[in-house]
Image (spheres, coloured by chain):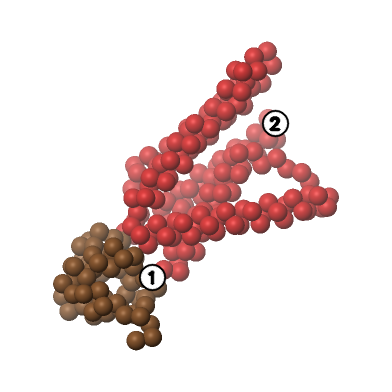
């Protein structure tokens, strides 16, 4: 799955640690999400979407898109 | 000193060494999940209790005149702290974030599969007479499982870094 997390985080001038703290996950999790090494669970995806005030589809998209 | 005691003491020392390397090693638990010494001790306290109780129980079981029921009770004394240790580990894993939890589950799978294969190889070699029979004892089994769990954590962590 592809995502725009790095771009959206950078647009808000947040560091990975800032985003991790807001999501209550480890910085490693944020890094793994941004590099596409880890796909979040549905609850975490909703949490990210809520935090960024976007829909899940605006952040995450299937690899083939 | 009985060789079994020396082997057990060496395994316990190995267990503690591997445990402390694991707790304070960045490759096992990255910076954001590094455990303070107090938390690490609290998490591993029941393991230490189980090891101490095991040594005391083995020493106590040298008394030949004890009733069988009492011998059973003393022999199984390390089981309770071991169960409490396992419970503590599970609680700790449940408190981790989802990626860290996945890493720990992958490490458990790695440790279980590797131990199964290792014991299969050892058993086959012993059956063929290529290897002398060795009694691992629960400390040896535990040290090996813990070591493999930490190795699994390191490998899994590297995958997600």
Q: Residue at x 70, y 40 (%)?
A: B135
Q: Callout 1: residue from which chain?
A: A
The chain whose colour is red is B
Chain A on-screen colour:
brown
Q: Is residue B32 left or right of residue B145?
A: left
Above or below, comparing residue A62 to residue B119 in the picture: below
Residues B65 and B97: in front is B97
Q: Quadrant of residue B161?
A: bottom left
Task: Kindly identify which numbered label has been placed on residue B2.
Answer: 2
Residue position for label 1:
A38
Q: Quadrant of the N terminus of chain B?
A: top right
Dot 1 lies on which element? loop
Dot 2, how many residues are within 10 Å of its Cα: few (below 14), some (14-19), or many (20+)? few
Q: Is residue B144 left or right of residue A54?
A: right
Picture coordinates of residue B105 (x, y %)?
A: 46, 56
Q: Is residue B5 left or right of residue A64?
A: right
Dot 2 lies on which element? loop
Picture coordinates of residue B57 (x, y %)?
A: 58, 25
Picture coordinates of residue A2 (x, y %)?
A: 34, 80
Foreground disc of the pair 1, 2 = 1
Q: Quadrant of residue A3?
A: bottom left
Q: Is residue B99 left or right of residue B136?
A: left
Dot 1, how many residues are within 10 Å of its Cα: few (below 14), some (14-19), or many (20+)? some
Task: Kindly identify which numbered label has been placed on residue B16.
Answer: none
Picture coordinates of residue B59 (x, y %)?
A: 61, 24
């Amino acid at each position: 799955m592809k995502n725009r997390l790095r771009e959206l985080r950078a647009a808000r001038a947040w560091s990975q640690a800032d985003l991790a703290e807001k999501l209550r996950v480890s910085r490693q999790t944020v890094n793994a999400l941004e590099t596409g090494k880890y796909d979040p669970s549905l609850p975490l995806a909703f949490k990210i979407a809520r935090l960024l005030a976007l829909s899940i589809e605006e952040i995450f998209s299937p690899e083939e898109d | 000193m009985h060789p079994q005691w020396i082997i057990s003491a060496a395994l316990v020392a190995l267990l503690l060494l591997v445990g402390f390397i694991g707790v304070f090693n960045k490759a096992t638990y990255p910076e954001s999940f590094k455990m303070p010494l107090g938390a690490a001790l609290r998490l591993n306290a029941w393991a230490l209790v189980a090891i101490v109780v095991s040594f005391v129980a083995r020493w106590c079981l040298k008394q030949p005149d004890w009733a069988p029921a009492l011998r059973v009770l003393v022999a199984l004394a390390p089981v309770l702290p071991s169960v409490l240790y396992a419970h503590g580990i599970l609680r700790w894993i449940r408190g981790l974030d989802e990626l860290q939890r996945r890493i720990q589950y992958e490490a458990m799978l790695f440790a279980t599969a590797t131990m199964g294969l290792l014991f299969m190889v050892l058993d086959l070699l012993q059956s063929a007479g290529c290897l002398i029979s060795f009694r691992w004892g629960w400390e040896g089994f535990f040290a090996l499982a813990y070591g493999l769990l930490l190795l699994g954590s390191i490998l899994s962590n590297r995958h997600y870094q």
